[in-house]
Amino acid sequence: MPDIRMNPVQRKAVDLIKKKHSPEEHGGLLTCLTGAIQDHMTKASRILDGHPHKLTLSKVLLYRDAIPRDQNNHWRPVSDDNQEYSNFMIQLICCIIQIHLGFPPLQFSFTLSPRQTACLENLLAVLGDDASMAHKRMLAYHELAWSLVDSDLTLCITDHWANPIQRAVWLRALHIDGNFTKAAYFTPDLTKFKYLCNATSLLEALLDKDQDTDSVHADDYDRVAQIHDCVLRLSPPTTFNFIYKMQQYASSLTFNQVKEPNVYVDPGVKSITISTQTMEMDKL
């Protein structure tokens, strides 16, 4: 990856692949992908609607048994009106698809594992099948998303950049001039990556993949707790923990950044403006 950062041609290709893609690309695959991701987002936001233990499961997803007693924190889905999160996921998967199919001259790889590659190829096959139903396309996307969240931890032992989401963060942060996005501007993207982990994990726990509708199960608590232990528990080198640590690091950089005071003094010293507030000197 350092070779890409140092090469102007490669940086230009990185900038190009991160731009918005047209629906006509790859025979309309991206249009079908958009629908699948939006359906996935909608399913995640509504799968707990009407569940008798909705609040409990929303807390177990984040904390397992260590639910803080002095706080009312729990997982909350984004509003259906929020397009930023779904557009972010669409752009992420578009980049993965583009590079998998070939995007010359970019010499970048997400280093997908055999399992992740198989999920991606299955998604492409389902999206390319005009007879496939929307539910099947959503499930195919879910399997790919879950493979990215539930990554093979053993691969990170020999390669610290073996996680595709880690590489996606690097790719997204790289500017065309070779610098990286400031921490304050990149924090919202990390929040979206974190949402991907939580939403996909919730669906993996509760989704009835062989049915069009989802039911309440007697073991829903155990299902969510097991998924939390697998991919959301703090400490193991999971995709979620990489994002979590990056959030902590970016926040510390942002809070410790020294900024120039936003103060303007009128040339005649008749007023002082601090941010958007103006004080008249003769009224002091």
Image (tube, grey):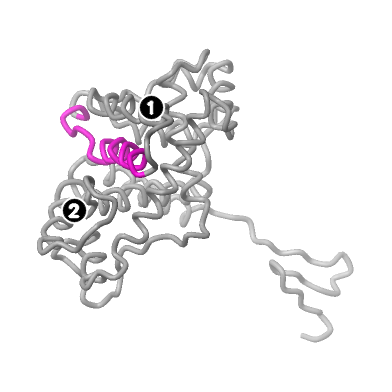
Kind of residue at badge 1: Leu
Q: Nearer the viewer, residue 56 or 71?
A: 56
Q: Quick check: 129 above or below 36?
A: above
Q: Which mark is residue 163?
A: none
User: Which residue corresponds to the image point at 32% horizontal and 36% vertical from the top-left?
Assistant: 140
Q: CA distance from mark 2 to mark 1?
A: 29 Å
Graded by Cα atoms within 10 Å as few (under 14), some (14 to 19) or many (20 or more), the crowding at tag 2 reads many
230 versus 179 height, above or below: below
The stretch drawn in magenta includes residue 153:
yes
Label at residue 228: 2
Tell me which secondary structure the magenta stretch mostly adopts.
helix
Q: Is residue 174 found left or right of 115 in the rendered image?
A: right
Q: Is residue 241 left or right of residue 15?
A: left
Element on which disc 2 rests: helix
**Who's the residue at 52% across and 51% down the image?**
84
* Cβ atoms under marks 2 and 1 closer than 8 Å: no
Q: Does residue 178 appear to the left or right of 110 in the view shown?
A: right
Q: Which residue is mark 1?
A: 124
Query: Residue placed farthest to the front in the image?
Result: 131
